Image (cartoon, rainbow, N blue to C red):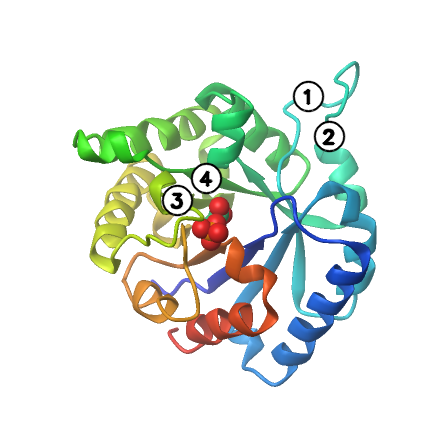
Amino acid sequence: MTRKKLIAGNWKMNGSLAANAALLQAVADGLQQQQAAACDVAVAVPAAYLAQVQQLLAGTAIALGAQDVSEHSSGAFTGEISAAMLQEFGVCYALVGHSERRQYHGETDAVVAAKAQAALAAGMTPVVCIGETLAEREAGQTEAVVQRQLGAVLDTVGKDDVLRLVVAYEPVWAIGTGKTATPEQAQAVHAALRAQLVAAHPEAAGVRLLYGGSMNAANAASLLAQPDIDGGLIGGAALKAADFLQIIAAAAGDL
Ligand code: PGA
């Protein structure tokens, strides 16, 4: 089963009008010189910049992503942004359940599943983020934790919608710390997640499983060479055009 790799940048709460324009200009220029079509590329940007980035991405091969989406469709939810609103700005991907949302905003597995459902209903691809903390890994609970997190989504979305998900395994201890999971550690978790997906839908061998957590220009190729690692969710390294382009090149070369 060949899965086209996906490299998605997660800008988190970074950027400015000027910095966004410079970064995307450099990435788009670099992509024109690469085998860009060999790999899908996206950037998940702060909501305040969706309109700007939608314009900057016009005519490029880079897809627009959001970092979160409300599980509600409209109404008295101050500060929230609905899937329909995101769709008006051409958003293709919505991160749901990033560990920073789970940790700092109290998002539960049930909320994350409802957000995935809301994104799907609006025609977007949810990027379902899951991952264990260091304490959970050290207690030998990694597989149980990530399978519980993914299971909540699989139990909520319709059976055929399983095929429309992207899943991002991001060990919490590897995010922004410079500590990456080894390719073997990441592959072991991805294989367990693949088995869970295939149990939910027989064609889920085609679902993309991204790795995230301190992926960078130096370690991307060895992670992306693993059989069940189908791309990356990139934080810090997505803010530097040269690094992001190198990660995309590593993905494009390993199809
Ligand atoms: P990082 O972040 O690449 O800076 O570790 C990844 C993420 O949180 O999505």
User: From the viewer's perspective, is residue 168 above or below residue 143?
Assistant: below
Q: Report the residue marked by disc 1.
A: 72
Give whichever of 138, 40 is nearer the camera. Answer: 138
**Is the residue under label 3 in contact with that under label 4 (CB below 8 Å)?**
yes
Residue for point 56% across, 56% down: 9
Q: Is residue 76 left or right of residue 30?
A: right
Q: Is residue 124 left or right of residue 202?
A: right
- Of the image marks 4 and 2, the number of the one nearer the N terminus: 2
**Is the residue under label 2 in contact with that under label 3 (CB below 8 Å)?**
no
Residue 194 % position (x, y): 30, 46
Specify the amino acid type for callout 4. Answer: Cys
User: From the viewer's perspective, is residue 196 above or below residue 54?
Assistant: above
User: From the viewer's perspective, is residue 249 above or below residue 43?
Assistant: below
Which numbered disc, 1 or 4, marks the residue closer to the eye? 4
**Mark 2, other Cα within 10 Å: few <14 / some 14–19 / many ≥20:** many
Q: Report the residue marked by disc 3.
A: 170
**Is the residue under label 4 in contact with that under label 1 (CB below 8 Å)?**
no
Q: Report the residue marked by disc 4.
A: 129
Residue 192, image quadrant: top left
Cα gap from disc 1 to disc 4, whole angstroms? 19 Å
**Is the residue under label 1 in contact with that under label 2 (CB below 8 Å)?**
yes
Residue for point 74% across, 41% down: 47
Specify the amino acid type for callout 2. Answer: Ser
